[in-house]
Amino acid sequence: MKQLAVIVLSVMMLSVAFVGIVSAQDMRTANLTAFSPGMNFMSEAGYLRYLNYQQTGQWPPFTR
């Protein structure tokens, strides 16, 4: 029974993380220019991280 609970909890946590990643990829910034006022003077990667934070309340990890 404990194993089932651990598996269910693991799947739920992974699905929440996946939803955060997918939502960040769905954002449209094609018509915006990096470091412009429309992007709050941020790079595209930084702006997408910021938008993701606004939607989920969690900062995604910064990767290069």
Image: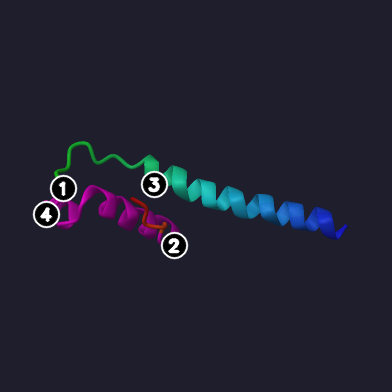
| Label 3 with label 2: CB-CB less than 8 Å | no
Residue at figure coordinates x 53%, y 46% from the top left = 18
Amino acid type at circle 4 is Pro
> Which residue lies under the disc numbered 1?
34
Residue at 20% of width from left, 52% of height from top? 43
**Which residue matches tag 4?**
37
What is the secondary structure assignment of the residue under circle 1? Answer: loop
Q: Main secondary structure of the magenta part?
A: helix
Between residue 50 and residue 62, name the one nearer to us. 62
Nearer-N-terminus badge (3/1): 3
* Amino acid tagged 2: Gln
Amino acid type, callout 1? Ala
Distance Cα–Cα, label 3 vs label 1: 17 Å
Which of the two labelled residues, at mark 1 and mark 2, occupies the earlier sequence position? Answer: 1
Circle 4 Cα neighbour tier, 10 Å, few/some/many (<14 / 14–19 / ≥20):
few
Q: Find out whether residue 42 is within the magenta segment.
A: yes
Q: Residue at x 67, y 49 (%)?
A: 11
Q: Which residue is mark 3?
A: 24
Q: Magenta span has 39?
A: yes
